[in-house]
Amino acid sequence: MRFQLVLMILLLVWSCEDKQTSKNSKTTVVKDTVTTIEKPAPKKKTKKTSEFPILTDANAMEFFLEYDKEHKEDKVRVTTDFGTFDILLYDKTKFHRANFIYLTKRQYFNGTQFYRVIKDFVVQGGSSDGLDLYKKRRKIGHYLLPPDTKRGYTHQRGSVSMPSSEIENAYKLASPFQFFIVMNRERAKHLDGDYTVFGEVIRGMDVVDKINSVKTDEGDWPLNNVYIRKVEIIE
């Protein structure tokens, strides 16, 4: 009986030791994990597109038809080396008005010149002898506007009209980048019907008279450049 009791005690002790040993010798396996940091996908380089279309003969009229609906300004101020003068643009000649407002907002006229001055006849502006003019026109486009001569406007003193293009054509398409102001006090009737009157000088005609008095070379270009420093929208 005593032997059995001793045997049971020994078995109990061995059992506890085995559990403890097993517990202590248990291997904990830590699963290796690789943390992958995903690099963001490279952003695609998007080519910057201008908010303005490149105008051509094919799209210019449609563009200005829509532009006219949202841009109703009709007065601009021209700052020159001789002072400032204001122009009222006629709503009836909507394509020419819209074109002039568009070019003004694109700052096309800034830095151009009055490059043709004929005493008591016209002063003509919107061109330049600078190389940057080509870049300006290239960004805007190459297009022509058809004449709009049946609105009842005639070439009076102070009238603002659009010169014909250098390109010969049967319709006397006009250069959209240039304009001329009539200086003749007895009007220039012979221009009616060939060129589009689309505005008039409403303030500062004395400034235009000063420009008309400058000395020119044989090609009517002022001997001293007369710059259009700025054209801006006014109310």
Image (cartoon, rainbow, N blue to C red):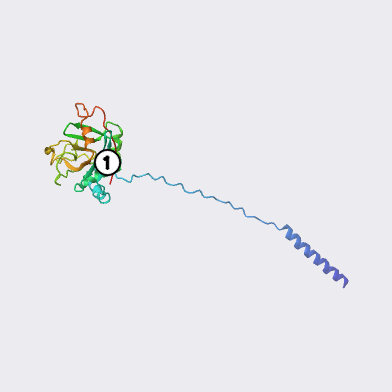
Secondary structure type for disc 1: strand
Residue 134: image location, x then y, percent: 28, 35
**Res 149 quadrant in image:** top left
Q: Mark 1 points at which residue?
A: 77
Is residue 101 visible to us here?
yes
Judge left or right: residue 165 versus residue 139: left
Residue 72: image location, x then y, percent: 26, 49
Quarter of the image that includes the N terminus: bottom right
Above or below residue 50? Residue 81 is above
Judge left or right: residue 79 versus residue 149: right
**Res 25 quadrant in image:** bottom right
Above or below residue 51? Residue 123 is above
Q: Residue furthest left?
A: 190
Residue 191: image location, x then y, percent: 13, 38
Report how many numbered discs are placed on residues in the image: 1
Residue drawn where x is 85% and y is 68% of the image: 6
Residue 2: image location, x then y, percent: 88, 71
Residue drawn where x is 20% and y is 37% of the image: 180
Is residue 144 visible to us here?
no
Judge left or right: residue 101 versus residue 27: left
Q: Which of 42 and 97 is in front in this view?
A: 97
Q: Which residue lies furthest to the bottom in this view?
A: 1
Disc 1 residue type? Answer: Arg
Above or below residue 32? Residue 147 is above
Mark 1 burial class by Cα count in 10 Å: few <14, some 14-19, many 20+: many
